[in-house]
């Protein structure tokens, strides 16, 4: 059959054909389809013209299908069954889902949800896979090119075709070990903090839009010298620096992780809130907004929606993120 012939094939004709086959009568088929008998007879004639076959012959007990009609019936039934499935609401079998989700997220945000997410996937979606990379200035390109499925970061603006959703806000803190001169203080002032070396969990060259560096720039304009002695995205490097007496500015979730790990290793570590000079000038009072982003193409993807909503749920359940 040529393509121009296929374009003449109305789905309603196929439904009419199968119904006549099942009922063995035009009148009964018309009643079942809530049509008039003349209307269904016209459809039958169109089918005969289309397939160049009588399709049915009259017998004393009703209509008898021709050999061609019997062949067509076996071909048409799976087509209609497929069309029925096509019209049914899409569903997602999470337990048997076999798909890899690729995330770009910094350790500060990752720490807030990765453990409960791994536990959940192990039980509820055992065939789900993940690839996790560190969020960077190239992550937007990864989302646009389909290399990254989900990005999580303190975003300011996003390129076109990328959707975002505010997960919540997170706070910063300062970590000191017993080797730091200010370890025994009850609180820290900004003047005291910058009188000693400190490290940050951001690299300015790669994170020009981060709220942290916007805050540093404002404080430097007030005469505070806030040049970090160490910028690193490696928590292992930061841990070594803290152990040797350097202060570390990081998110509260990573701060708690530091305290747990380093205390377990025999190093005394304390967490301090940010000095009031910082919180008073920082955007959102040093409560950084955390956004999750994805490409428009994945917005209505059932599996993608399930996964990103699960990540949002787990992040909002953590004590380190305040929901919006």
Image (cartoon, rainbow, N blue to C red):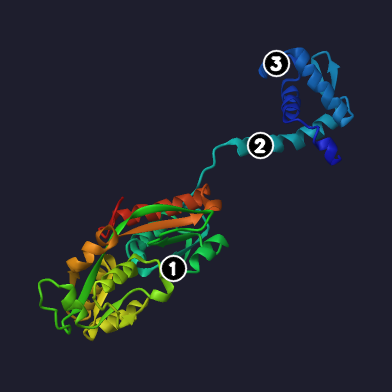
Answer whether residue 163 is visible to the viewer in this image.
yes
Answer whether residue 270 is visible to the viewer in this image.
no
Extreme-right residue of the structure:
52
Tell me the distance, in whole angstroms, between the alpha carbons under discs 1 and 2: 42 Å
At horizontal 10% and vertical 78% (from top left) the residue drawn is 184
Tell me the distance, in whole angstroms, between the alpha carbons under discs 3 and 2: 21 Å
What residue is disc 2 on? Answer: 83
Query: Residue 127's spot in the image, x, y percent?
Result: 49, 59
User: Which image quarter: residue 314?
Assistant: bottom left
Label number found at residue 35? 3
Helix, strand or loop status at disc 3: loop
Q: Is residue 182 left or right of residue 243?
A: left
Q: Is residue 67 left or right of residue 308?
A: right
Tell me the distance, in whole angstroms, between the alpha carbons under discs 1 and 3: 61 Å
Closer to us: 189 or 70: 189
Query: Residue 305's spot in the image, x, y percent?
Result: 47, 50
Q: Is residue 147 above or below residue 48?
A: below
At horizontal 67% and vertical 19% (from top left) the residue drawn is 33
At horizontal 36% and vertical 69% (from top left) the residue drawn is 107
> Which image quarter is the N terminus in?
top right
Helix, strand or loop status at disc 1: loop
Do residues under tags 1 and 3 come within 8 Å of each other at their CB atoms?
Answer: no
Query: Residue 164's spot in the image, x, y percent?
Result: 44, 53
Q: Is residue 78 left or right of residue 53?
A: left
Q: Is residue 101 above or below residue 189?
A: above
What residue is disc 1 on? Answer: 135
User: Which image quarter: residue 219?
Assistant: bottom left
Q: Decide which of tag 1 and tag 2 comes sooner along the chain.
A: 2
Closer to us: 274 or 20: 274
Label number found at residue 67? none
Helix, strand or loop status at disc 2: helix
């Amino acid at each position: 059959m040529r393509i121009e012939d296929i374009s003449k094939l109305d789905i309603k004709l196929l439904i009419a054909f199968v119904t006549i086959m099942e009922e063995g009568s035009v009148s009964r088929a018309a009643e079942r389809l809530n049509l008039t008998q003349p209307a269904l007879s016209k459809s039958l004639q169109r089918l005969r013209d289309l397939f160049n076959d009588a399709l049915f012959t009259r017998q004393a007990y009703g209509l008898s299908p021709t050999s061609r009609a019997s062949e067509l019936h076996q071909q048409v039934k799976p087509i209609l069954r497929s069309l029925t499935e096509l019209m049914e609401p899409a569903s997602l079998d999470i337990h048997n889902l076999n798909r890899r989700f690729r995330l770009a997220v910094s350790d500060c945000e990752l720490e807030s949800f990765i453990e409960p997410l791994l536990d959940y996937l192990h039980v509820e979606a055992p065939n789900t896979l993940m690839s996790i990379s560190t969020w960077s200035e190239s992550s937007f390109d990864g989302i646009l090119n389909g290399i990254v499925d989900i990005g999580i970061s303190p975003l300011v603006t996003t390129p076109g075709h990328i959707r975002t959703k505010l997960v919540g806000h997170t706070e910063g803190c300062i970590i000191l070990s017993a080797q730091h001169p200010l370890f025994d203080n009850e609180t820290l002032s900004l003047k005291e903090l910058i009188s000693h070396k400190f490290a940050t969990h951001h690299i300015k060259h790669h994170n020009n839009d981060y709220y942290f560096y916007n805050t540093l720039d404002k404080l430097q304009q007030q005469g505070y010298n806030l040049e970090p002695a160490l910028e690193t995205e490696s928590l292992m490097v930061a841990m070594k620096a803290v152990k040797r007496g350097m202060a570390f500015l990081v998110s509260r979730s990573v701060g708690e992780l530091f305290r747990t790990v380093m205390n377990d290793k025999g190093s005394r570590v304390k967490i301090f809130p940010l000095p009031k000079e910082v919180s008073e000038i920082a955007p959102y009072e040093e409560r950084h907004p955390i956004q999750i982003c994805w490409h428009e193409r994945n917005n209505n993807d059932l599996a993608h929606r399930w996964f990103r909503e699960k990540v949002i749920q787990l992040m909002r359940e953590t004590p380190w993120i305040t929901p919006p």
